[in-house]
Amino acid sequence: MTLKVALASFAHVHAGSYAHLLAAMPDVEVLAADPDGASAPDEGPRGAALAEAFGVPYVDTYDELFAWGPDAVIVTSENAGHRALVERAASVGAHVLCEKPLATEVADGEAMLAACEAAGVILMVAYPVRFAPSYLQLRANVEAGRLGDVFAVLGTNNGKIPYAARQWFVDAKQAGGGAMIDHTVHCADLIDGLTGGASATRVYAASNRILHQDKGVEVETGGLVTINYDNGLLATIDFSWSVPDNGPTWGGVSLQVTGTNGSVEIEPFRPHVGGTDANGEVFLGIGGNLDESMLDTFLDAVRTSGPAVAGQPPAVVPQPDGAVGLRTLRIVDAARRSAASGQAVDL
Amino acid sequence: MSEELAGLTVGLIGAGNISHVHVAAWKAVGARVLVYSLEGAEELAEEYGLEVVPSLDELLATEVEFVDIVTPSATHKEITLAAIKAGKNVICEKPLTLTAADSHEVIDAANAAGVRLYPAHVVRFFPAYKAAYDAIQAGRIGEVAVARFYRQASSPAGAGWYRDVAHSGGVIMDLMVHDLDQARWLCGEVTTVYAVQNPPTVDGISPVNVAAHVTLTHESGAISHCRATWGATGTTFQTGFQVAGSTGVLKFTSDADTGYREELQNGGAGGDLLIPASTLGESPYLTQLRELAIGLRGGPEPRVLASDGATAVYLAEAARASMESGQPIDMKTFVSSGAVA
């Protein structure tokens, strides 16, 4: 069965990856719209020109995109625009894969979950690191009890500042903050997957703007979040945009997990061929295409679930789902309040 | 499951070490597998849900689309020729045969019969080696100057036929043949081969704790080195390379940068203690066998052909000739003696 998959906005840098993958899939018809691209402050093509570069068909407006009757919609707009597009997708009965973070405000996230539940559509959140082979091995080991009881986690998601390609990432209103919301959610999601959805009870965050001062950025660029969970687990996440602009790769993720029987550390983006070339250090990643695994999981669920029936839950709820997106957003929201107040925040 | 391989039935011949990863790959693409082996077929079939066929002739008379030969190296030629005679396409584990002359004989037989034959040189399907190949092809490090490849494994002390050079070809033919193929894939055709081994092979039995070093020169002017070691029993399997070019260098070692590190006490508390390493990413054996099977169905030509397998064997033979003469072998004039040991 051919699936009609709509790609809503090219604001997020991942839209290109999804477009290339979708264009190469048999039994998938793609259509994209990027109506706000023309007014973006970034250099480089957006809209129809970018769709052509990605190799996907294009329409000028969301009206045309949603009137096309998509089976599924992938939302890759600015973070603050997620709610409107997800609600619109739900209103036409289309299953949704929403770029992370779920939203910029908890109330928006709650409304999105409610809209998707009422419409009976899938709401999956784009957390591709969940599909990393090293993470799957870690999770299998945790679930098999090889680590004993897991009592502490240190996560890092350090990368380059996503400034050159898309300036909205450093616009607090559009993004919901800076590095804190951009990066904390990835590690929070990985921890959520290990605990089976433990809820945060207390969050403390400290942040600063020492990195990238030359760019005149008004959002936090570095810092740490410490989280206590309802199952006793404690975790700290370094969310800093601390990879220099001339680094050999965009950055990476690590998760160091300590249990009563030992520890495991994963670095899903570490496998690579290294070296140097005329431009400096070479880093050829060989860890597999996580976006592809994530899209396969989403589209398999869309196929299996079939058309949405309002009020009926979809037959398959692919993970990470909207509930994970909301739990991780609550952590970021508490972290923002903590960083502003200097006090730990209870949830 | 693989749509391109829907309805596939494979005839597996052999049930030894490597058969397990091949079977896992065939299962992953949804294939039905019939197996024939002198030993171990019942156990393998029991473990993976295969169908045992009692003889080679009966297997070749079934509807299998092709055979996958995973028997000891010395039997590759005879079984491949039997499959070709039965009109079956063939995937054969490396080395394709134990001499280049035999490799050319099976290739000629396959061509005459209109049968396809692919050798399983799996290293071409390991992501690090493919990434290096692609980067070199794209000019990322300029002109290749000096390349080194290494491969080490635990001495196969207990497994009879590996040490018997008449059956395995020894450490160069069995283990280094992978990197001889890599050296040629990444650096181009070979002009000379110089080889040493310590300790030497005596009376056709390879020593344990043995190292072979081979230096190749290539038509492009590049120089490469392959080092293969059967180390102390228990030695971790490791591979790696460094390729230096006129504008850059590429490096990889299999034991570093894996992205997964664990330190667990007393083996863990219950659950599956042996999580196979292949859970870290798609098995290169699966990548390989899928690509070869799609090639056998008339799809795109795979990245390794029978002629590549024959050349790798030819290089390994030249290495042995070099060890005998103590001098480099000129590949323009080298004619293999055809002798196995």
Image: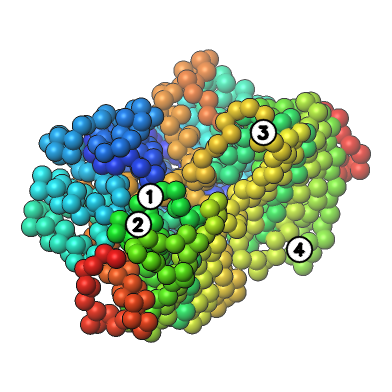
**Residue B160: numbered disc:** 1
Chain bearing mark 3:
B
Is disc 1 placed on a helix, strand or loop? helix
User: Mark 2 or mark 4: which is in front?
Assistant: 2
Q: Are marks 4 and 3 in contact (CB under 8 Å)?
A: no
Q: Which residue is mark 3?
A: B268
For the residues beneath circles 2 and 4, the answer to whether they share a chain is no
Name the element at disc 4.
Answer: loop
Residue that label 4 marks:
A212
Q: Position of residue B120 (x, y in %)?
A: 31, 54
Residue B193, quarter of picture: bottom left
**Residue drawn at 39 percent across, 44 percent down:** B17
Q: CA distance from mark 2 to mark 3?
A: 39 Å
Residue B57: percent from left, percent from top: 14, 38
Say which mark, if any, is on residue B303.
none
**Rendered-image quadrant of the C terminus of chain B:** bottom left
* Location of residue A247 by image quarter: bottom right
